[in-house]
Image (spheres, rainbow, N blue to C red):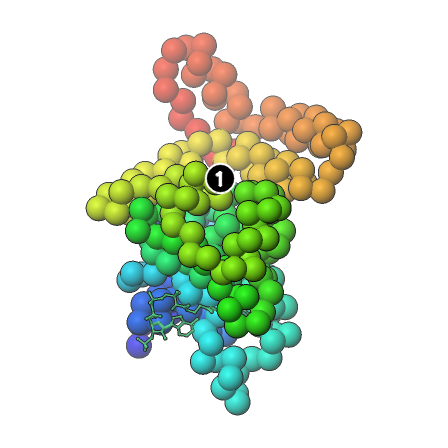
Amino acid sequence: MESTIIKEINGSVGIIRLNRPTKLNAFIREKALLFQDVLEEFATDAVIRCIYITGNGKGFSAGQDLEEIIADDGPTLAQILSEHYNPIIHKIRNIPKPVVAAVNGVAAGAGANIALACDIVIASENASFIQAFSKIGLIPDSGGTFFLPRLIGFQKASAIMMLGDKVSAIDAEKWGMIYKTLPADQFEEEALKIAHQLAAMPTKGLAHTKQALNQSMSNSLEEQLALEDKLQQTAATSKDHQEGVAAFLEKRAPNFTGQ
Ligand code: T3D
């Protein structure tokens, strides 16, 4: 049987394909644990400078597999959050590399919130985002109540979380929930181009930017200014910083190595 998570390395981009297409890539325990293993592997592989997550088939992910939660031998609710989704969100936010979600189709429940935890979310014009939790008496998890109000504001976040509306990719882009919508027929090619662009950039600088953005969620202005000062001093010691400045002054294209 094909794996529920397919990993590929394409140049410096580590690709993760969620692969249960007949169930819209809904998560079962085995898949959630494997996903974490691959995130960890790509996080530590020096060749990989950008991670790209997408879904196989017509959906990105329909979140938790609802059959698994009623199965006698399925994981408990406590396990589902503490061993599946929470570690996935922690890893995505803490990997010192850009993580791109390429949302090819519907993203619902935890599937939507895993995408929204990524650094850059790109969606096919056919994709949609559903905070499906309210329809089954649950609350949005996988960081949804943290990221969504910060992305689109408290009011819209409350409404779509309570009503469980299907938000089109086009509206998601308009509201600032995602970075960009791409035409369906060019989706994978164009989304991968963005991942390759990120992978060719100064990886350490991007990692520091990610860290600063993470901490901006809870820091005061004073704390954030101090953090920027500290991270900028570190970024300034990187080879890629030297290369960027040299390339600019020599009027040539830079060759960043991620060092
Ligand atoms: O206790 C806990 O679970 C805590 C953790 C919570 C985390 C969560 O993610 S909770 C939210 C779980 N997800 C949902 O509630 C979404 C359920 N799915 C849907 O509402 C719809 O499938 C969609 C709106 C996402 C897409 O609709 P549509 O019409 O495009 O597709 P479909 O026909 O409903 O689905 C296609 C197949 O995938 C179908 O299987 P079948 O009948 O062809 O054999 C459907 O049953 C299956 N599927 C879709 N979502 C799930 C699923 N099977 C299991 N679990 C799913 N979540």
165 relative to 198, above or below? below
Neighbourhood count class around disc 1 (C-alpha, 10 Å): few under 14, some 14–19, many 20 upward: some
Residue at figure coordinates x 29%, y 61% from the top left:
58
Say if 4 sits above or below 68 in the image.
above
| Residue 120 is at least partly visible in this image | no
Q: Amino acid at mark 1?
A: Gly
Residue 218 pos. (x, y %): 71, 42
Percent x, y of residue 192: 33, 43
Q: Judge whether residue 138 can be spotted in this image.
A: yes
Of residue 24 and residue 207, the one placed in the foreground of this image is 24
- Of residue 229 and residue 126, the one placed in the foreground of this image is 126
Residue extending farthest to the left is 185
Residue at image coords 66%, 25% = 233
Q: Quadrant of ligand 1?
A: bottom left
Question: Which residue bears the numbered disc 1?
Answer: 176
Decide which of 71, 237 is in the foreground and name it. 71
In the rendered structure, the answer to whether residue 123 lies left or right of residue 165 reads left
Q: Residue 52 at x, y = what percent?
A: 40, 49
Q: Secondary structure at mark 1?
A: loop
Viewer-proximal residue among 63 and 175:
175
- Left or right placement of residue 15 versus residue 205 in this view: left
Q: Is residue 61 above or below residue 243?
A: below
Residue shown at 58%/39% (left/top)?
210
Name the side, left or right, on which 122 lies relative to 210. Answer: left
Indicate the position of residue 221 as horizontal and vertical percent values: 74, 30
Image quarter in which the N terminus is found: bottom left
Q: Residue at x 47, y 76 (%)?
A: 66
Quarter holding residue 55: bottom left
